[in-house]
Amino acid sequence: MKAQRDKRHARQASSPTPETPRELFRKVMRFECPGRTLATLGGIWQSTLDRWHAEGMPAELKTIPDLIDYFGLARHIWEGPRASLLTYPHFERKVLRETGTTVTYVNWMGVVCTEFKTDAYKSMPHFEEFPIKTRQDWDSYKERLAWSDERVGKEWAEQKARWQASDLPVIAAINRTGSLYGTLRDLIGVERLSYLFYDDPRWVEEMMDTMLELFLHAMDALFTDVVPDAICLWEDMAYRSGSLLSIRHVRDMMLPRYRVMVRKAREKRIPVILLDSDGYIGELIPIWLEAGMDGVVPMEAQSGMDVALYREKYPRLLMMGGVDKRALARDRGAIDYEIDKIRRTIATGGLIPFFDHGLPHDASYANFLYFVERLKEVAQGR
């Protein structure tokens, strides 16, 4: 009996400890586990959850983490640091007018926008007026972009401690501050900024330099004693057919500054640098890779961003997203197509698949259940 117990204990002692989600994420990002990946979920609209409850989903499943836990998927932490990383102080929210269905207000960035009073997430706000129209406006605005240590305080300390104690992968979203184009577009407007690249490029570069300086300060303040598993910069600088600005301008004006951003992130020992942009980004990816970035998100399928094709083109490109959300509004055949695309891509690693945008309510609960089971299979290499 003693010999049997010793053998059993020896087998237990030699059994590998199950991977934590963080350990698996790191392996995927290093291409160390081809054929396997993290099975997780991205955004899902509230109206989608409402539909699924009506179609039989348990009532206690109210959030995406609830779904992840219930269906045996893996959580991840995707958060922006709780600190004032763009405007300081923020603009005070001020309601300018209302109708029965809409509200027009000044947002925290100083943009006047109109959105629906209910279910605003279902559509983009309509931007009525931008805070920067002239150089004088910029001179005033950039006072709110000056760095001060008061921007980072207790909330960040608490969030940082939670990240450090977790066994989940942490992707730090450096959204508005990790941007050279996207934030300026939101402060000036697409049309006005597009003209400025030709009419006053020096001013555009001055604004980009201000954004760059803010980013460098933020990296020093945030990541001196904590290292997330990845950071995600943000641009949203493409639409369905291509870049919102010329590739020449991206290369001449943004690439040198991206290199500085990447160098700072590497100094902080950040292992993975991602960039978030919707739309067709095929012509932008080579520039981001040349700058030293590692990958992209969300690989919007309806804009032609097929993860399997881009894996063939860029064998070491990291990708997150890439699952065409429209497939879940169709049928199992469409879902199987997405699963096959994922399988072919993760065969060599470097992909964390999830919906390429928030999943809308045209997806049935039955289709979601089928997708989850197929996702778990392919993520485990089956």
Image (cartoon, rainbow, N blue to C red):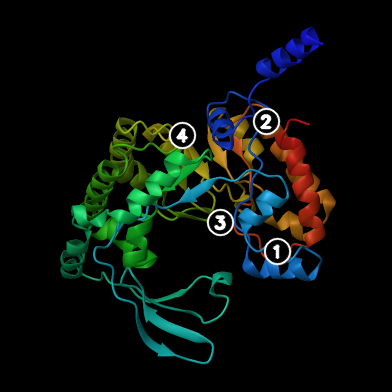
Q: Which residue is mark 3?
A: 240
Q: Which residue is mark 2?
A: 36
Who is closer to the viewer here, 262 or 376? 376
Q: What distance separates the C-alpha of mark 3 from that of mark 4? A: 23 Å
The local crowd at label 1, few if under 14, some if 14 to 19, many if 20 or more residues have their Cα within 10 Å, is few
Q: Are marks 2 and 1 in contact (CB under 8 Å)?
A: no
The local crowd at label 4, few if under 14, some if 14 to 19, many if 20 or more residues have their Cα within 10 Å, is many
Inspect the image, locate mark 2, and give the three-letter code of the amino acid beneath it: Arg
Q: Which residue is mark 1?
A: 60
Q: What distance separates the C-alpha of mark 2 from that of mark 1? A: 30 Å
Mark 4 and mark 1 lie on one chain; the one further toward the N terminus is 1
Q: Are marks 4 and 1 in contact (CB under 8 Å)?
A: no
The residue at the point 73 percent across, 11 percent down is 6
Res 180 seen here: no
Q: Which corner quadrant holds the C terminus? A: top right
Mark 1 and mark 3 lie on one chain; the one further toward the N terminus is 1
Q: Position of residue 287 (x, y in %)?
A: 41, 38
Mark 2, secondary structure of its residue: loop
Locate residue 282 relative to residue 253 in the image: left or right. right
Identify the image quadrant of residue 85. bottom left
The local crowd at label 2, few if under 14, some if 14 to 19, many if 20 or more residues have their Cα within 10 Å, is many
Inspect the image, locate mark 1, and give the three-letter code of the amino acid beneath it: Glu
Q: Which numbered mark, 4 or 2, is in the foreground of this view?
A: 2
Q: Which numbered mark, 2 or 3, is in the foreground of this view?
A: 2
Who is closer to the viewer here, 175 or 209? 175
Q: What distance separates the C-alpha of mark 2 from that of mark 3? A: 30 Å
Question: What mark, if any, has residue 294 been given in the picture?
Answer: 4
Question: What mark, if any, has residue 367 been given in the picture?
Answer: none
Q: Which numbered mark, 3 or 4, is in the foreground of this view?
A: 4
Q: Position of residue 92 (x, y in %)?
A: 30, 75
Who is closer to the viewer here, 330 or 202? 330
